[in-house]
């Protein structure tokens, strides 16, 4: 006999997670909290993919990977890494020491800013006297000739066929440019002083964006050989972390500041885009360490990954929040690991750890052999308003058939004792015309999404769900949930909470 | 079933967490209400019990067991004779100064003691130690958490136990404002009690009943005295 009930649908969760709203004020397509989950383009929530070692053998006795990347040098795709006091060619996952005679000072905070300048890799770290250049092949790295104009540059970029370095020793507000077409010739007057410490360099549209915490300054080509660039301060806010600057399609430049993540579209103002991370996420970050945060543009997924220090005394980047610029939504954090650098290698995010390894992210179903602890929490919806008590009957979860894994579903509400039910997702059936055997096999479903019901309990105007799976190699994708309830009516509550 | 099983099945029907002590306490309160309700409906066969007490030389008054609702009969198993129930006024009339002692032949229901247990006065006042056996109709105790693991069968027969579940569920749903659900459960409870009642009527098999003579040494509400003579 059918159950006389009404239905409340939660999801698809295209609005992503919102840490700035209480669960009670979250819309049905919003998520109150999550860890290690992603939101897909259809609004489905999945356990994030895992990571695995890119280089099987640790580099430089488990040294910190202060930079890594992939560039094309002399027509060959090369993967490189800085590990402690050495520089490596890590192409194919095998590390070859290419340090040569350059001086590299080890230190977790001696991270490198690098750029492909034509056919030469240039890297600087603000610590070692000279910048480093590498032309690939079997050659070693070498010191970048800077004509003794500067030492210890912190930021580097390549724009207008020139190399540019900023924030140098003794002049943090200064940016130098090389001659056009010659990255190792630096004129004695080829510099600009901004008055503020330079925090990052990033070409943008037809200008070079020079970030300071006090604003974004631009250099615009003039076409005049005497005064080749016009300097201008465009905004009153710039980044605090040069490695966090990324430019996404639509020509928007995203960057981290102390109070959140901003975007700049080239105009006279910047716009904060991370309001959804306020209140319950951003205040937990160690602001003093945000200068060492970094970000990655991940085009295959149309995402930007921000690596941030979560915890009042957290020094390393242990939390990744993800911005989907297609959904214009946030999700994450991803956690369970700490990273010091990141780059796109073979179209996948690769991040350097503190043990001599580059890790290939967004790959596999475990974190280098460990379980991924993933959960997400929905909005707490009162379908008939806060005055009307509802009896919660059962929940129907729509999920992808990824395997016969258990998914825990906890029901949470102020007046309901928290209760956890388990559903088994998918089945281990056999495919027709493949492994299916008549009279012995279970036929695998040919639909992508399956449903299963789980019990709900209690009486309360509202309820929310928490889906979780903490097991290794057990991915899940939840498309939406349908909660069945019976409206009881206006019932006066004698006490707060459970009674 | 144990008390806890009944409580948890009822909570499941109400849609409340069966592990929550808050809800279990609430359901136990309702269990106690429903058992008293059911106990009052009929003379349930499973509530007829028996017990004993021992007399003491010079003591006239004795307390019965705490679950005694109505004493039914007494007998002296030491001296092998019945003890008839009479009123306290009759004993007072027979022995106004309460000085007669010997082998007690009569008992009067004499109110309750300071603990609320039913008290009986024996006449004559016992002059020795005898074992007095008695039958009675019992009450169902108020259950606490410590009895959650105990079987409820000694107090409510299995045929009637589903009524407890429906009764708890009805009261709890009513508390939560679900009058429709409460009504449905209430109907189920009444249905089960009716079935149990029919079974209760048949528990004595093919026993027949007849009115007793006043001189056959059986106490009862009704008696008759044959008049001497003949029926013409």
Image (spheres, coloured by chain):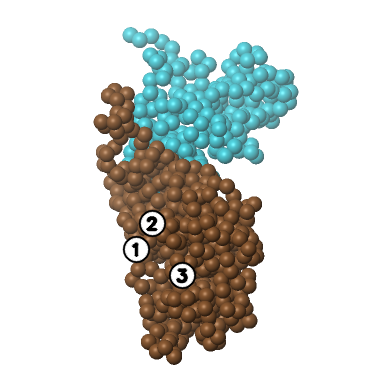
Chain colours: A brown, B cyan
Q: Earlier in the sequence, mark 1 or mark 2?
A: 2
Q: Is the Cβ of the residue at disc 3 closer than 8 Å to that at disc 1?
A: no
User: Looking at the image, is A130 positioned above or below residue A467?
Assistant: below
Residue A39 got which mark? Answer: 2
- Pick whichever, A159 or A232, lies toward us: A159
Which residue has dot 1 on it? A327
Badge 3 marks a residue whose secondary structure is strand
- x, y percentage for residue B53? 65, 24
**Residue A117, which numbered label?**
3
The earlier-in-sequence mark between 3 and 1 is 3
Cα separation, mark 3 vs mark 1, equals: 33 Å
- Numbered label tally: 3
In percent of the image, x 38 and y 68: which residue is there?
A: A248
Residue A101 image point, x, y percent: 63, 63
Between discs 3 and 2, the one toward the N terminus: 2
Q: Residue at x 52, y 54 (%)?
A: A90
Q: Is residue B81 left or right of residue A411?
A: right
């Amino acid at each position: 006999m059918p159950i006389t009930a009404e239905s409340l649908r939660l999801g698809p969760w295209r609005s992503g997670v919102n840490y700035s709203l209480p669960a009670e004020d979250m819309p049905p397509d919003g998520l109150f909290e999550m860890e290690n989950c992603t939101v897909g383009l259809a609004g489905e929530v999945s356990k994030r993919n895992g990571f695995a070692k890119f280089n099987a053998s640790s580099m430089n006795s488990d040294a910190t990977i202060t930079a890594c990347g992939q560039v094309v040098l002399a027509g060959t795709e090369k993967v490189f890494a800085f590990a402690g006091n050495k520089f490596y060619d890590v192409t194919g996952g095998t590390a070859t020491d290419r340090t040569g005679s350059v001086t590299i000072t080890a230190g977790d905070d001696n991270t490198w800013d690098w750029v492909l300048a034509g056919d030469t890799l240039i890297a600087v770290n603000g610590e070692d006297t000279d910048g480093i250049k590498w032309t690939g092949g079997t050659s070693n790295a070498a010191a970048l000739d800077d004509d003794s104009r500067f030492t210890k540059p912190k930021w580097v970029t390549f724009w207008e066929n020139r190399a540019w370095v900023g924030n140098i020793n003794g002049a943090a507000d200064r940016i130098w440019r090389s001659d056009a077409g010659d990255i190792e010739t630096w004129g004695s007057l080829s510099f600009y002083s901004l008055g503020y410490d330079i925090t990052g360099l990033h070409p943008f549209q037809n200008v070079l964006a020079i970030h300071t915490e006090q604003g974004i300054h631009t250099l615009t080509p003039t076409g005049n050989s005497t005064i080749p660039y016009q300097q201008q301060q465009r905004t009153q806010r710039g980044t605090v972390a040069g490695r966090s600057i990324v430019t996404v399609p639509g020509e928007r430049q995203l960057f981290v500041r102390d109070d959140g993540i901003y975007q700049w579209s080239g105009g006279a103002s910047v716009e904060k885009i991370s309001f959804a991370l306020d209140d319950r996420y951003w205040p937990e970050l160690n602001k003093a360490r945000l200068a060492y945060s970094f970000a990655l543009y991940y085009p295959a997924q149309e995402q930007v990954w921000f690596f941030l220090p979560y915890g009042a005394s957290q020094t390393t980047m242990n939390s990744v929040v993800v911005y989907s610029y297609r959904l214009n939504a946030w999700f994450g954090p991803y956690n369970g690991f700490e990273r010091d650098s990141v780059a796109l290698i073979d179209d996948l995010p690769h991040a350097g750890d503190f043990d001599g390894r580059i890790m290939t992210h967004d790959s596999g179903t475990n974190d280098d052999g460990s379980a991924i602890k993933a959960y997400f929490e929905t909005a707490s919806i009162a379908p008939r308003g806060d005055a009307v008590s509802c009896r919660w009957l059962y929940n129907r979860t729509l999920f992808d058939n990824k395997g016969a894994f258990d998914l825990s579903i906890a029901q949470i509400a102020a007046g309901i004792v928290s209760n956890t039910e388990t559903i088994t997702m998918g089945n281990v059936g056999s495919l027709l015309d493949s492994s299916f055997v008549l009279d012995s096999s279970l036929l695998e479903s040919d639909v992508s999404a399956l449903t299963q019901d789980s019990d709900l309990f209690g009486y309360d105007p509202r309820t929310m769900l928490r889906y979780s799976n903490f097991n290794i190699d057990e991915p899940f994708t939840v498309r939406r949930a349908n909660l069945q309830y019976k409206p009881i009516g206006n019932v006066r509550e004698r006490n707060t909470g459970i009674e | 079933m144990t008390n806890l099983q009944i409580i948890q099945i009822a909570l499941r029907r109400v849609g409340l967490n069966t592990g929550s002590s808050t809800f279990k306490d609430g359901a136990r309160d309702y269990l106690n209400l429903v058992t008293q309700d059911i106990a009052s409906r009929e003379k349930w066969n499973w509530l007829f019990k028996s017990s004993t007490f021992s007399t003491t030389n010079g003591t006239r008054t004795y307390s019965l067991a705490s679950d005694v609702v109505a004493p039914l009969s007494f007998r002296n198993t030491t001296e092998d004779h019945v003890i008839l129930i009479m009123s306290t006024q009759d004993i007072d009339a027979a022995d106004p100064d309460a000085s007669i002692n010997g082998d007690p032949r009569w008992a009067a229901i004499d109110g309750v003691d300071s603990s609320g247990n039913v008290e009986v006065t024996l006449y004559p006042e016992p002059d020795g130690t005898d074992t007095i056996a008695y039958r009675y109709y019992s009450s169902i105790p108020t259950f606490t958490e410590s009895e959650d693991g105990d079987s409820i069968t000694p107090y409510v027969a299995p045929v009637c136990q589903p009524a407890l579940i429906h009764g708890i569920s009805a009261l709890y749903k009513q508390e939560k404002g679900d009058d429709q659900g409460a009504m449905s459960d209430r109907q189920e409870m009444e249905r089960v009690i009716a079935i149990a009642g029919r079974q209760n009527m048949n528990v004595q098999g093919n026993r027949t009943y007849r009115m007793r003579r006043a001189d056959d040494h059986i106490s009862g509400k009704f008696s008759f005295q044959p008049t001497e003579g003949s029926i013409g």
